[in-house]
Image (spheres, rainbow, N blue to C red):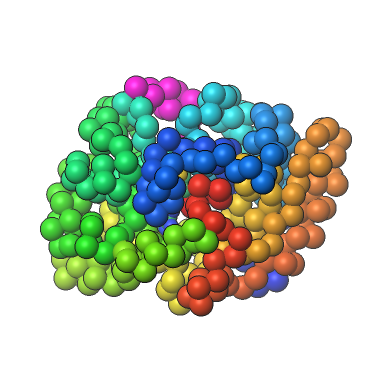
Amino acid sequence: MNILKDSFGRTFPYIRLSISDVCNFKCGYCLPNGYQIEKSDKRKFLHLDEIKRLAKCFYELGVNKIRITGGEPTIRKDFFDIIKVLKFEAGIQNVTITTNGYKLDKKAEQFVSSGLTGINISIDSLNKETFKNITGHDRLPEILHGIENLQNLGFENIKINAVLLNGVNSSINDFNTWAKYIKKNKVDFRYIELMRTGDNLDYFKKYHVSSNTFKEYLNENNWIYQTFGKDAGPALNYINPNFKGKFGIIAPYSKDFCKSCNRLRITSRGDLRLCLFGNTGINLRHLLQEDDQLNELKDLILKQMKFKKESHHLELGDTGSTKNLSKTGG
Ligand code: SAM
Ligand code: SF4
């Protein structure tokens, strides 16, 4: 079988698929003024049939995991049809989502019964006011309630992501608050270092902080660094037998971050992106129109793999063509 492999020996069993740029939140680092229709790009978001063909193609190229993201993926009307298609028609084993948790309390049951195998929920702070200040929405209680509902339904694979923001959610007190939460809750909580994108330079300068203080906190509090196999991806994970949950760090500016890259991205309009911060992006849509284009599509994607670079150059301020992460899904 032809599988996705680049010139540096990395393989790509994992796709992040954005299904919409639209979002209903206004996170300061991403869409501070909310979603604005992009007048220069009139293309519609991939429709269900295109998504099905794309997923079948990736399945045949060895992909076993697709994370659906956005924008906010759950506000798309055919969201649950998309999950069904990926899982039951294209045969993708692991279908997961990244969501801001909007209406999670009401949708938890449907998430579980849809066959999703994992849910990443973004919660930047457990403090209601801080959460509201960052996201522009006072929805923390419904999200936490939604997590309880997922847990009561026996759903196990829950991750919470927070963007680490200097002076906002980066104090020892914040770390302790999360520790208290994961002591009782079997969830993986990870801090993501704030990434600079085309749109957020001022915000980045004001709030970016290295995750080293959190790493020191983990070392001082008996958290043990856990290593996984080569397909584990770039997160650093920590365990502590006295806690039900785990801690983690996603540090894109760290030296070896790209070495363990195991994913490719597809934008909501069908561009293949070899790196979140690259300039390379070829549109696949013309080969998603008929079922019999499958082999041509596979060839095109395989040929693109030689253009995947060894590393991004975020540390040099090169954000590639990424204006904000609502376009490529973080
Ligand atoms: N709307 C969904 C959500 O917020 O989870 C999915 C899309 S969002 C772009 C995916 C992830 O990217 C979220 O966890 C978000 O916090 C993170 N993110 C967005 N902009 C970021 C930035 N500039 N630096 C680091 N993480 C960012
Ligand atoms: Fe929306 Fe997610 Fe961006 Fe926040 S991070 S504005 S929830 S797309």
Horizontally, residue 274 falls left or right of residue 132, namely right
Residue at 52%, 41% (x, y): give it. 36
Residue 237 pos. (x, y %): 34, 60
Above or below, comparing residue 273 to residue 186 in the picture: below
Horizontally, residue 188 falls left or right of residue 167, namely right
How many numbered marks are there?
0
Residue 64 visible, this angle: no
Residue 330 pos. (x, y %): 49, 52
Above or below, comparing residue 163 to residue 152 in the picture: below
Please identify the quarter of the rendering in which residue 163 is found. Answer: bottom left
Magenta span: 106-117
Horizontally, residue 76 falls left or right of residue 300, namely left
Magenta stretch: dominant SS? helix
Residue at 32%, 66% (x, y): give it. 206
Q: Nearer the viewer, residue 323 or 312?
A: 323
Q: For the view shown, which residue lies furthest in the front direction? A: 39
